[in-house]
Image: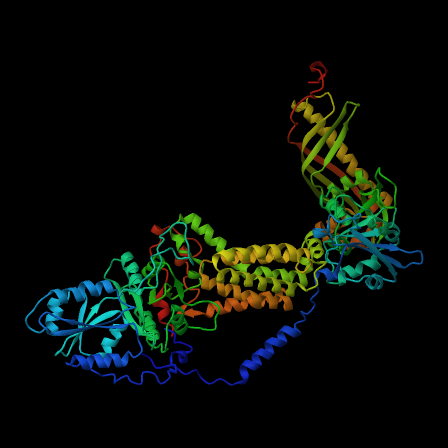
């Protein structure tokens, strides 16, 4: 497996924590047999945390227990029904012990005992309730997490006409369940990590044992383990830490909101990384072709899927090359255009004061701004933006002679072409490439376009995602899922030859 | 876990060097001729004429880009083109003078037609031709035409209703290949080959019925072939002769041919589908024997005789009449070329060169003298594929029809 180029990104990041938690006691604190001592310790640690609840319970027998939980993280119904009610209703003569409590008093499902105060604090922050019992060296933790979560909806970033409509949500347990639901096999293995010094975000590496390449798995685990950062907010953070070439415009890790896509890619021998608090799951290694496939390709009839795929192949070229070609041909190679067309282009450019390059750049930037505005604005205003954009740019600017009509046409086609790319992050990379290509075309003409194309090609050919070349499945046998989407019964091999490329070091 | 790898130290100059090399690649490769499309004057046609004092008059027709959003405005439509001209001792000087009159850079790559005025053609066109072979910005697929009886400049000023730019119409006329269509490339090939003289298409302007304002009511009309001997025009073939010439030079495309049946029985017309020509040359001592074999496939499209052509023997009569007519026509052309113009435009010398290279070595020096004496025979073989929809003419009574 190829080594990381920039291992330095994995080195511990300086935690610029101010002198926080001055009262925090030492890390190795243990649960004390004295209830007051424990309570004092907790109150000390969670100073100024108003959502921490300390509820003392007096049993009928006279002994007193302390239940502590973070009210914003737990489902209070669970605590009422399975912790407090049984305690208050059950009568025992003898003072309760930790074992009694755990075995008889609590009716909750997941119960653990721990002597470590550090563990207790973490559990509290995970949405557990803890029960402190006098005269015990252990405390009981009861799982009662009950944070509100949204329901499963169709992912707005990757909609399909035909196909499952559920998408990942922000809860990692639910996401894991969605995967388990699709892959009902004990081969579906998971390995959990806690990343982020302050966020303590759960990150799960998921794979199908027996299918995944062990070398690849080892590399992924190494890279994930190596992440040192104070916060992981989204899987994008993880992606940036583990990708091979951070300076490439092309994503080397595929992120998706669709459980069906992840399940399918796991079956191909890929590895998924689930990150808590984000619906975007990372799948790796990624190849160029992943960027051009929609999961719907596999749900509709194969000739249609193949046709759609070809349309995408065509339009990715248009997305990169249409404006540069226009600029190059109209400023350097006027002899290439048919006479009638050259006259009509020239006539529509009569009133335009800018060179074609500036014009195209202007339009492209305006288009990108419109796109960005359309995404960021609330839905209702987003409509208005597109209407204003269409009217102002398409009609008024042309009539005012600021922009020529052919450029508007070219930019619109380019915009549409970029939207045919199903993977959002991949489409972003393609869109970005258009600007250097425009400059090349505007300064060097077709020669510049050829140079740029060669550059892109060389970059793609040398790009690797976790040791797998970006162009990977281009061998005769595996073209069955690249150039055509062959029928599923005709595909008997997995598309990624991991083992072979695992050898190149 | 493997230990982190440190990248090897690189010399700090290397990226800088790479950038410099890349930069010089961009700058020094001579690709800075950026020109906006609306800073160009698109020449759509040129014309060369000879002035009285022996200089060359170059005229160019420049298209005026218009249309798009500006249409619908008040006032009459401005001209769609205009003509600039200048005189000089050669084409370059004249071109330079025209450039000085033009606010935009003259751009010749879209030129489709070059007119040669007849007087210049008779004087010799070699001096104006070299610029097309030397200058890389010229296109060899440009059509070249001789303007019969007029100056090329007048031709450029002709307005034509169909096309935005009148010269485009000439290009389209040439593309139909109903008459001689010769490009610069064809001309150069013929002029530099052994045993063949170049020809050019000829064009004249025809007065249309409408008002007689200057150039406004005129149309273009292809007018046969200009026969060159060396760089000079020695004569023309008219439209009829040109069609025979086209077949004899194997340039016949689908065109229509008609023939009168002997004895005043009427006439027939055919539409050619395929036409082929073969030339066989024999050397009998110093005597050159040439046999031109013409083969054609055609279908009958008109029958103004009383014959019922659905009967094979009647069709044979028609075919014979057509073959005779074609043979007569081609023989006439060959005769005219041999006797009147004494120019080997058909390329008979070239055929001898190909068929009998050794004899050609002997022959080529006085081919000019030998050529008119060459014995040329023409044989035609026509096959008629169909007799059309109706056998006998539908407008005749049954008893009038010759079965």
Q: Quadrant of the C terminus of chain B?
A: top right
| Camera sees residue A207 | yes
Q: Which residue occupies 12% across, 67% down?
A: A105
Give residue A497's position: percent from left, percent from top: 36, 64
Tell me if residue A344 comes above or below residue A470 in the rendering.
Answer: above
Residue A387 found in image quarter: bottom right
Q: Residue at x 71, y 15 (%)?
A: B397
**Residue A285 pos. (x, y %):** 38, 66
Question: Would you place residue A94 above or below residue B191 in this image?
Answer: below
Q: Where residue B302 sits: x, y (%)?
A: 71, 28
Asked if residue B304 lies left or right of residue A472, the reply is right
Visible residue check, residue A420: no
Please determine whether, in this image, residue A409 is positioned above or below residue A211: above
- From the viewer's perspective, is A105 left or right of B156? left
Q: Residue furthest left?
A: A93
Residue nearer the viewer, A140 or A452: A140
Quarter of image, res B39: bottom right
- Give the quadrant of the N terminus of chain B: bottom left
Whether A236 is drawn above or below B18: the answer is: above
Q: x, y (%) of residue A398?
A: 66, 56
Q: Nearer the viewer, residue B78 or B366?
A: B78
């Amino acid at each position: 497996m190829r080594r990381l180029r920039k291992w330095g990104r994995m080195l511990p990041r300086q935690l610029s924590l101010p002198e926080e938690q001055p009262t925090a006691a030492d890390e190795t604190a243990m649960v004390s047999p004295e209830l007051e001592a424990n309570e004092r310790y907790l109150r000390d640690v969670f100073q100024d945390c108003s959502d921490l609840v300390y509820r003392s319970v007096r049993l009928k027998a006279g002994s007193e227990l302390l239940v502590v939980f973070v009210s914003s993280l737990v489902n209070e119904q669970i605590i009422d029904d399975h912790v407090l009610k049984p305690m208050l209703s059950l009568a025992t003569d003898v003072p309760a012990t930790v074992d009694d409590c755990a075995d008889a008093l609590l009716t909750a499902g997941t119960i653990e005992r721990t002597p470590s105060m550090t563990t207790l604090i973490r559990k509290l922050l995970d949405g557990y309730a803890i029960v402190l019992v006098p005269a015990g060296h252990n405390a009981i933790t009861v799982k009662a997490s009950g944070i509100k979560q949204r329901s499963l909806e169709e992912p707005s970033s990757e909609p399909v006409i035909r196909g499952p409509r559920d998408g990942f949500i922000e809860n990692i347990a639910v996401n894991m369940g969605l995967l388990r639901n699709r892959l009902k096999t004990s081969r579906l293995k998971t390995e959990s990590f806690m990343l982020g010094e302050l966020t303590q975000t759960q990150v799960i590496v998921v794979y199908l044992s027996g299918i995944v390449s062990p070398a690849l798995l080892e590399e992924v685990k190494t890279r994930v383990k190596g992440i040192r950062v104070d916060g992981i907010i989204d899987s994008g953070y993880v992606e940036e830490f583990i990708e091979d070439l951070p300076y490439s415009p092309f994503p080397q890790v595929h992120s998706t909101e669709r459980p069906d896509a992840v399940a399918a890619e796991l079956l191909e021998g890929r590895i998924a990384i689930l990150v808590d608090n984000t619906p975007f799951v990372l799948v790796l290694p990624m190849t160029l072709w992943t960027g051009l496939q929609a999961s719907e390709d596999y749900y509709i009839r194969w000739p249609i899927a193949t046709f759609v795929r070809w349309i995408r192949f065509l339009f990715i070229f248009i997305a990169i090359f249409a404006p540069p070609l226009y600029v190059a041909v109209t400023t350097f190679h006027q002899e290439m255009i048919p006479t009638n067309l050259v006259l009509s282009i020239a006539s529509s450019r009569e009133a335009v004061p800018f060179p074609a390059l500036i014009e195209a750049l202007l339009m492209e930037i305006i288009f990108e701004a419109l796109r960005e505005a359309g995404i960021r604005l609330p839905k209702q205003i987003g409509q208005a933006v597109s209407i204003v954009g269409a009217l102002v740019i398409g009609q008024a600017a042309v009539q005012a002679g600021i922009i020529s009509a052919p450029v508007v046409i070219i930019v619109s086609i380019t915009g549409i072409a970029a939207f045919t790319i199903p993977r959002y992050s991949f489409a972003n990379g393609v869109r970005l490439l258009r600007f250097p290509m425009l400059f090349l075309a505007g300064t060097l003409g077709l020669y510049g376009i050829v140079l740029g194309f060669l550059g892109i090609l060389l970059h793609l050919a040398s790009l690797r995602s976790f040791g797998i070349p970006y162009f990977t499945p281009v061998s005769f046998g595996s073209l069955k899922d690249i150039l055509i989407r062959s029928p599923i019964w005709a595909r008997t091999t997995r598309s990624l030859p991991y083992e072979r490329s695992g050898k190149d070091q | 876990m493997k230990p982190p790898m440190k990248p090897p130290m690189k010399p700090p100059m290397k990226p800088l060097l790479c950038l410099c090399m890349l930069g010089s690649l961009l700058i020094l490769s001579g690709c800075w001729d950026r020109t906006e499309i609306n800073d160009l004057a698109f020449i759509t046609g040129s014309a060369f004429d000879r002035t009285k004092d022996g200089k060359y008059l170059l005229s160019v027709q420049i298209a005026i880009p218009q249309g798009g959003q500006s249409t619908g405005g008040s006032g009459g439509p401005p001209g769609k083109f205009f003509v600039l001209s200048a005189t000089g001792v050669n084409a370059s000087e004249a071109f330079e003078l025209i450039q000085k009159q033009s606010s935009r850079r003259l751009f010749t790559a879209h030129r489709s037609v070059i007119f040669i005025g007849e007087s210049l053609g008779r004087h010799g066109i070699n001096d104006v031709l070299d610029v097309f072979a030397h200058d890389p910005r010229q296109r060899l697929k440009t059509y070249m035409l001789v303007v019969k009886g007029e100056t090329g400049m007048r031709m450029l000023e002709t307005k034509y209703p169909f096309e935005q730019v009148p010269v485009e119409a000439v290009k389209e006329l040439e593309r139909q290949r109903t008459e001689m269509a010769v490009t610069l490339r064809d001309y150069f090939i013929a002029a530099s080959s052994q045993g063949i003289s170049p020809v050019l298409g000829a064009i004249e302007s025809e007065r249309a019925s409408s008002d007689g304002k200057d150039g406004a009511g005129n149309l273009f009309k292809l007018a046969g072939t200009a026969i060159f001997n060396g760089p000079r025009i020695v004569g023309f073939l008219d439209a009829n002769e040109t069609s025979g010439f086209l077949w004899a030079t194997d340039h016949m495309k689908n065109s229509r041919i008609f023939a009168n049946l002997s004895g005043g029985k009427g006439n027939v017309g055919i539409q050619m589908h395929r036409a082929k020509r073969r030339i066989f040359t024999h050397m009998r001592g110093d005597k050159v024997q040439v046999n031109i074999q013409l083969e054609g496939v055609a279908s009958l499209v008109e029958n103004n005789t009383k014959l019922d052509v659905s009967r094979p023997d009647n069709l044979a009569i028609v075919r014979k009449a057509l073959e005779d007519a074609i043979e007569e026509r081609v023989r006439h052309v060959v005769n005219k070329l041999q006797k009147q113009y004494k120019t080997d435009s058909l390329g008979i010398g070239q055929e001898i060169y190909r068929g009998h290279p050794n004899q050609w070595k002997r022959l080529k020096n006085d081919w000019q003298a030998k050529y008119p004496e060459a014995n040329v025979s023409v044989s035609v073989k026509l096959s008629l594929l169909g007799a059309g929809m109706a056998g006998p003419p539908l407008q005749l009574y049954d008893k009038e029809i010759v079965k």
